[in-house]
Image (cartoon, rainbow, N blue to C red):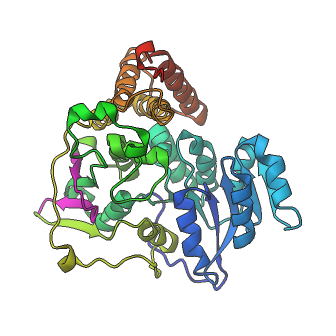
Amino acid sequence: MVGCARRSMTTSTTPQRISILGATGSIGLNTLDLIGRMPDRYAIEAVTANGNAVALAELARKHGAKFAVVADPDAYEDLKAALAGSGIAAGAGPEALVEAATRPADRVMAAIVGAAGLAPTLAAVRRGTTILLANKECLVTAGDLFMSSARQSGACVLPVDSEHSAIFQALDPTQKKDIERVTLTASGGPFRTWPIERLTDACPEEAVRHPNWSMGAKISVDSATMMNKGLELIEAHHLFDIEPDRLDVLVHPESIVHGFVAYRDGSVVAQLSEPDMRTPIAYSLAWPERVEAPTPRLDLAELGKLTFEKPDYERFPALGLAIRAMEAGGGAATVLNAANEIGVNLFLQKRIRFPDIAQIVEDVLEKQILEGFGEPASLEDALAIDRWGRDVARTVIPERLERTG
């Protein structure tokens, strides 16, 4: 892992200061739950949210943050009023997000959803701090730039996604040449056993009803299309510097085994735990040590069996599109992510049908091939390609996809 020598992190009795980008989301709230149980070990430096000023102010007060930021400038007055008399500084807008990311924290939890998290997380990387990376879009939209920036600054990038945390724990970096395959698991989401023809009628309420995990709406829809697993493959490619042809996916409905690393001697090393995000979050907070987490303990005898199957690319075309973008390189993954965010948003608004999400992404990727964007070399490049992908996604949506009722 870039910049992550296995050194002790608890040589000081002073609590580590943590900044949380995306504090009101599921990752942020789970992180604060863990930190609140260990006040002698951790303290909060900064917290951010998109626009929920009241909820953010409540969290900032409860956990003693020094700085709170809303991304939406229109929410600034509400945040300032909610923090009145607390001594907690308030900020709003993109520049304030970057300030929150670069304050003197020991670790920064990067949990802003989507491409919006790229600029503040990259700023934290360039400061050289330890990044707890829960925003996969940072590596999907600008993977080479992100990881090269970490190498230059000496930042330690630790994965928070359960699958990447599993691979991090199972992968021996001294034996990288001996790795045959890295496998991420996927639950298959709520539509794994639906008749394919019925997916046209799937509604957002059904798509966000994940069988195993409690997640936000966007990532839940990505899980339902399996685009989430495709994005995770791209993330793993950059995070672990593993070639695309050595990465694959297995559908594992129980969500107990989170990832495998297969070595050339026939050994397969895997990480298992109950599907609770506090397990990988706790690992990233304490690494290279471990701390107590209030998570369910795995009982394999009670579980009885674990099942696995290959992904169905007809049912989940989004996964195939993500693999195609990963193999193509250049700006394909940036465009893939941008188009997907537009498609998911339209689906959640009930303006398009579930299968149309992947169709929109495919249409935009076809246009990207003609443009031939290279790998983003700067933040500005990544944001420009992202904007292009969003603009094209909006233009390829045919009138017949719009819901009228």
Q: Position of residue 68 (x, y in %)?
A: 74, 58
Vertical relation: 201 (above or below) 308: above
**For residue 180, what is the image quadrant?**
bottom left
- Secondary structure predominantly adopted by residues drawn in magenta: strand
Left or right? Give the position of 299 relative to 227.
Answer: left
Q: Position of residue 124 (x, y in %)?
A: 62, 53
Residue at 61% x, 57% y is 24
**For residue 343, what is the image quadrant?**
top left
Residue 229 makes an appearance in the image: yes
Vertical relation: 368 (above or below) 240: above
Vertical relation: 268 (above or below) 101: below
Q: For residue 252: magenta?
A: yes
Magenta span? 246-265
Q: For residue 73: magenta?
A: no
Left or right? Give the position of 396 relative to 312.
Answer: right
Residue at 50% x, 56% y is 133
Residue at 52% x, 70% y is 285
Left or right? Give the position of 40 relative to 158.
Answer: right
Residue at 40% x, 29% y is 332
Q: Position of residue 177 (x, y in %)?
A: 23, 56
Left or right? Give the position of 161 relative to 271.
Answer: right
